[in-house]
Amino acid sequence: MMARDLSVGYHLGKGKEKVVHRNLSFDLVQGELTCLLGPNGAGKSTLLRTLSASQPSLGGELLFEGTPLENLNERQRSKLIGVVLTDKTQTGGLTVYELVALGRQPHTGFFGRLNAHDREVIAEAIEAVGISHKMKNYMAELSDGERQKAMIAKALVQECPVIILDEPTAFLDVVSRIEIMTLLHEIAVKQKRTILLSTHDIEQALVMADRLWLLSRAKGLNAGVTEDLILNGSMDQLFDREDILFDNNHGSYYPRVVWKKQMVVEASDTILLHWSINALNRHGYVCFDANDPRGAGCRTLHVRTANDLFFMDVDGTINRFSSFEEMLKGL
Amino acid sequence: MPASKGAKYGFFLVITIGVLFAANLAFGSIKIPLGAVIDTLIGGTVEKESWRFIILESRLPQALTALFCGSALAVSGLMLQTVFNNPLAGPSILGINTGASLGVALVMLLLGGSITVGTYSFSTFLSVLVGAFAGAMAVLALILFFSSLLKSNLMVLIIGIMIGYVTSSAISLLNFFATAEGVHSYMIWGMGNFGGVSNDQLPFFVGSVAVGLILSVLLIKPLNALLLGHRYAENLGINIHKIRNILLLTVGLLTAVTTAFCGPIAFIGLAVPHMARLMLGTSNHNSLLPVTLLMGGVIALTCNLICILPGENGVIPLNAVTPFIGAPVIIYVIVNQRKIQYFN
């Protein structure tokens, strides 16, 4: 699926429009998991709604394998694009099987009768997302994670080449988040589908996404393979805040330390170093290494192991601690 | 599995309808022995000719009317509750019943009971019919218009409520300026009555309701998709505007016909879908719609039986009975909301 000079936004009536983004051009690559990241209000949901044809574009072209999306009727589109949203539904009284079966509607006849092939596809999808044991339960009885998996299974049975998900892991715990991201990536690669999802879970996105779309109001859409975007500094510029920085090493955002105090830190390995700096930053200390001239005249924290730390002051005084808790109390 | 549960309940309901139907024929304000009832039905000789007349010309059409009216209202209520995602939706909520009532009020109170259009002149009862139809269809046209403007189901529902209020006040105004007899006739009509359909009007009544019921059965698949909300339903290939319009037209037809012939009947459309859902435990319209349809018939026949209970002492008005069945169901559902799965 691709776009050229696409403008997305809203019609405000009386011929006025609110353009959220213009001149977007991108390619959604088949067989890959693409994650859409960006600050709140960047227009992620607007873009996703436009791509899933839930909302008309304000200009430009949006094509699926060469055909403009708006030329297709809803029946044709229902076989091309499947969605997973955060919308509330009235499906509490449906069993998991019945809900997933709704995804077959584009393929079934007048009364939605399921034939043997339909039943096969449904069973496979429920198995793939890992909720076969809950197949006969009502949706109201499921946990949030299981419900989300059921909705993903429903999108799978629609047998669409493109699946678009709007914050699919929004209310889930980390285990469910990883399970779902892994599942989606597997589906993209093994079933050669095109999967695009928006998320605020940057940590998992950087691990599982083949491609990132970084969307911001100021700079529009910046697309590329995950590692390229991390290493060319794009992640630093995604959130336009001076006081929030991106840690290229660990793939996470963190707040800039307000420079109150200084300390030199020496540790016997990188893990101890990272976490010592983490603790000291939290207490308002900017940390330097032993060779940094800016650290001259400061106390030094030596970390040999997690249970063997000591402060050495400029005058030679040493204070020993056997845990981070003690050390931080002794600051 | 839910499907066979639906079939089981459906079968049970059909039996119940049969029993209630027979009871409606056997009991009434005039005492008629059971033997005579059976004789009349199988075409044998009956002791008193008046008995045959009562059974065939009064009780039989009344029972049939109740059956079809109950089904029509129940199915209308179910469709409205699904499309507006609102468990409190019903035919009266959209103001269609009120629109029909306004049409009737105009005929009875303003036009003095007859309408002359061109060379056609409608007699009293027919004028009431025409008035109810016109009123219901006018409100329906308004709802359709707003439905095409607004994508949000909730907003359309609120517009329906507002229209209902406006038509209600128009009715109050007409009542205020009317004669005592006019107000009295209108009040009696407003109490609801299954006995208002004569044998020659019956085919038209049954036919119209049947058309509406068939249309509703054809809507089962999109109704299930609508449970997901309009964005998911669109993604599954449903044209929301088209489906909503067909649905509202079907509901309009069913409620206009029932209100025109039987007066505005409260609570059946609102409560029966909940009863069906509680019984079946499912929101799947594949079984829910047919069961709601049958249950509507059961409830209506039951209400009719209660209405003629006093026997020789008179008849209880219909709209005095339906709330006693309907309101407890709604209160039960609201109080037990958290435990009821289709609410979550």
Image: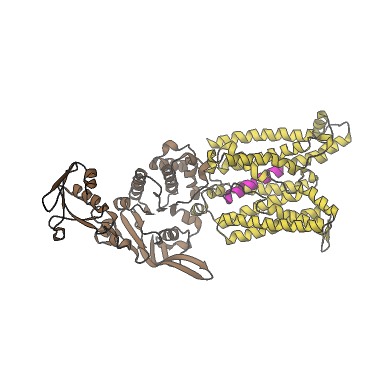
Residue visible at 53% across and 38% down?
Answer: B339
Image-based side of B197 in relation to A230, left or right: right
Is residue B65 shown to the viewer in this render? no
Q: Quadrant of residue A67?
A: bottom left
Q: How is the image coloured?
A: by chain
Q: Which residues make up the magenta segment?
A: B68-88
Image-based side of B93 in relation to A110, left or right: right
- Residue B161, position in %: x, y? 65, 55
Q: Quadrant of residue A223?
A: bottom left
The image shows residue B144, relative to residue A178, as above or below, that is below
What letter labels the chain drawn in brown? Answer: A
- Residue A301, position in %: x, y? 17, 50
- Residue B88, position in %: x, y? 61, 47
Q: Main secondary structure of the magenta part?
A: helix
Q: According to the rendering, which colour does chain B have? A: yellow
Residue visible at 53% across and 40% down?
Answer: B338
- Judge by depth and name the residue closer to the eye, A227 or B333: B333
